[in-house]
Image (cartoon, coloured by chain):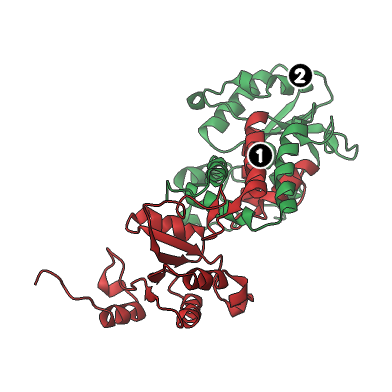
Chain colours: A red, B green
Amino acid sequence: MDNAYPSKLLEKAVGEFSKLPGIGRKTALRLVLNMLRRSEEEVEEFAGAVSRLRKDVKYCRVCHNISDTDVCPICSDTHRDASTICVVENIRDVMAVENTQQYGGLYHVLGGIISPMDGIGPADIEIDSLVKRVADGGVREVILALSSTMEGDTTNFYISRKLAPYDVELSVIARGISVGDELEYTDEVTLGRAIINRTKMTGK
Amino acid sequence: MDNAYPSKLLEKAVGEFSKLPGIGRKTALRLVLNMLRRSEEEVEEFAGAVSRLRKDVKYCRVCHNISDTDVCPICSDTHRDASTICVVENIRDVMAVENTQQYGGLYHVLGGIISPMDGIGPADIEIDSLVKRVADGGVREVILALSSTMEGDTTNFYISRKLAPYDVELSVIARGISVGDELEYTDEVTLGRAIINRTKMTGK
């Protein structure tokens, strides 16, 4: 189904949709035909939402999270603990941590992760601004909540070196077997780390 | 991940994407964040293509296929056999048949299929205009190329009744085992039909 589009307008719209990650030309055609079945107002609503988002979106000047305002609601919430900063790769991670309802501090969104393979170095992500936040004082702990990959570990290491001169506690989120995972199906690296990083049982 | 969007603009765009078929909120967020990484021009290109398609799209007044012109390129192609009409459900089917490069006639796009369960009756799809095309003369054969489902069979039957008064040959595309299918995995209905509709081997 790669040729023979009966309309240039259709072909163009399918082409645009198939630029999205994980959307091939067949799926794109299905999505576009779904659009065609909607009212003109609904389609304008869709196109407008996408266009407005790109044009008007802001990034919090403190933590670099997406925001409608100059400083995001999390950073400006005085009920949150401003002395703790959780460092994450992207805004999806902020949402994931927020959804746990286990964290009451602030965030710092790196906007990426150090990855020499992809040509992303320390200067390409928001590390300097993190160091500045710490240097400005008032920060007691920085929690590194990056993916448990080589890139994540590299970034953790780089940040820990950069923050070494400052009087701030550094921690990394726990790695271990997932809740609900069966031991026999856990990979040996994870299991090994889980044994090394065992925690004392309380209540004994 | 159903709450805690850091931005209303983001939430709105995710909401719009998740209205698309087969796109949940997690996938929608991934697509929207991908949009955010593109340039403003690229995003305008995307939004514009969708909006223009819906506003400016035409349907061929002969066969009802999507078209940029009043009469689509297939219907206006004088090299094609105008005496044969292949009846299909939607434009994706036109593209599928075109891609076989085995058909040189014209099409008629019903825009749906008779389905009492979904409240779609004969009047909701382009059957009357098909009958009119046949009544106007010049059509030698009508090929019914609908899905091999109950709805497809119902529609085939309805059309055959409607075209009965006219001097036109009616045929249905062959049903049988797919090329490359193994016999033991073919369902019994398909296999039964394939035996009943067996074709003479040529070259003997």
**Helix, strand or loop status at disc 1:** helix
Residue B90 numbered tag: none
- At horizontal 53% and vertical 27% (from top left) the residue drawn is B115
Q: Is residue A88 left or right of residue A197?
A: right
For residue A82, above or below residue A176: above
What residue is drawn where x is 44% and y is 79%? A166
**How many marks on residues?**
2
Could you say which disc has been placed on residue A48 in the image? Answer: 1
Chain bearing tag 2 is: B
State whether discs 2 and 1 lie on one chain: no
Residue at the spot 58% in from the left edge and 51% down from the top edge:
B32
Q: Nearer the viewer, residue A150 or A5?
A: A150
Q: Specify the quadrant of the image occupied by residue B30.
A: bottom right
Residue highlighted by disc 2:
B132
The percent coordinates of residue A99 (x first, y second) are: 38, 53
For the residues bearing labels 2 and 1, Cβ distance under 8 angstroms: no
**Residue nearer the viewer, B185 or B67:** B67
